[in-house]
Image (tube, grey):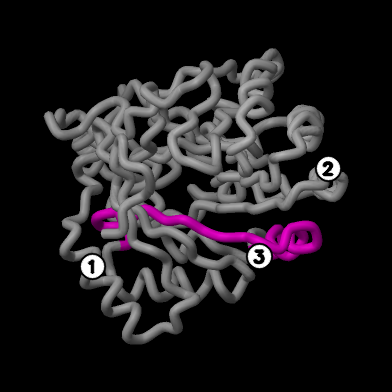
Amino acid sequence: MDKSFKNIDKLIEFLEIDKDNQKKILKNSNFKLLLPYRLAKKIKKNDLSDPIFRQFVPIMEEENIDKNFSYDPLKEESFSKTNLLIHKYQYRALLITSNFCPLNCRFCFRKFLKKTSKNNNFESFDKEIEYIKKDSSIKEVILSGADPLSLSNLKLKEILSKLDEIEHLKIVRFHSRFLLADPSRINNDFLKTLKNFKKQKVFIFHFNHPNEIDEDIEKAIKLLKNEVSLIYSQSVLLKGINDNYKILKELFEKLIIIGITPYYLHQLDKVQGAKHFEVDEEKGKKLIKQLSESLPGYMIPKYVKDVPFEKNKITV
């Protein structure tokens, strides 16, 4: 994988941020900067409104505390059946495979997650596998985290092998944003691991802006299509990034063209420090209406929000 920016001063120098704009950047955030070089290259120099800059670089607005925002906005601790397994909805359970992601999105609702080791090697997931085995109502397991593709192919093979042995389990779903950092993660060894896994496989990748999609990601998706027929996307509606009809239209068109079906457009989860990303729901509804008037239905994701203790995601 390409090198990543972890030092804010080095990124400021790389992006040629002037002194006035530097005052708007948060240099000592508890949620550290982690921005892959391949993404940093896409950012317009000295432009704090750039959509990739806004998603990944800490700014002073993150320091604003809002009483309606929290450190666990989805109350996931209430649904944790083990340290690493969340069982909130019927039919499926979510396995937190890792707390490591190759990029730190400033609006991440699990930005305060501290559940696994960064080296990702010591967790056996025995308790989680045992829980899934005992509950025959669980037909689908979601591999999430931070990012399941941060695991080695060997570790993923180990997890998938254990899941493959559970007869009542039918589907395994991957939730990932890893391709933005390193599209070459979809390598031959990974594809071989998927090929040997007997259950139905579903991938949901996270894309928020058309600038994120490039030829390398398109190539990765084409390779993945050899082993996986169901590939979807989810996006978060973000103020100043994609709360714009033309941008969303371009994003969903691009996704369809490279073989990804738009699945969800999420209302922002109210995680502390992300208030400046929030878009009014009425504006979101208007955007969906505009998109519905100009795009075929298969290109338009469901506009949803996650409400703690509800039995499903709520359509806005």
Q: Position of residue 301 (x, y in %)?
A: 42, 66
| Disc assigned to residue 218 | 3
Instruction: Look at the picture and state if 215 lies above or below 85.
Output: below
| Mark before the other along the chain sequence, 3 or 1 | 3
Q: Which residue is mark 1?
A: 285
Q: Position of residue 316 (x, y in %)?
A: 26, 59
Residue furthest out toward the top: 122
Instruction: Look at the picture and state if 39 lies above or below 159.
Output: below
* Image position of 92 (left or right of 202): left
Determine the CA span between mark 3 and mark 1: 30 Å
Query: Which residue is depicted at the point 36% across and 23% down?
Result: 78
Residue 228 magenta: yes
Of marks 3 and 2, the one in the foreground: 2
The answer to which of 41 and 237 lies nearer the viewer is 237
* Image position of 172 (left or right of 86): right
Near mark 1 (Cα within 10 A), the count class, few <14, some 14-19 or many ≥20, is: few
The residue range painted magenta reads 218-242
Residue type, numbered disc 2: Thr
* Residue 251 placement: quadrant: bottom left
The answer to which of 255 and 25 lies nearer the viewer is 255
The answer to whether one can see residue 157 in this image is no
Residue type, numbered disc 3: Glu
Question: Tag 1, which secondary structure?
Answer: helix
Residue type, numbered disc 1: Lys
Of marks 3 and 1, the one in the foreground: 1
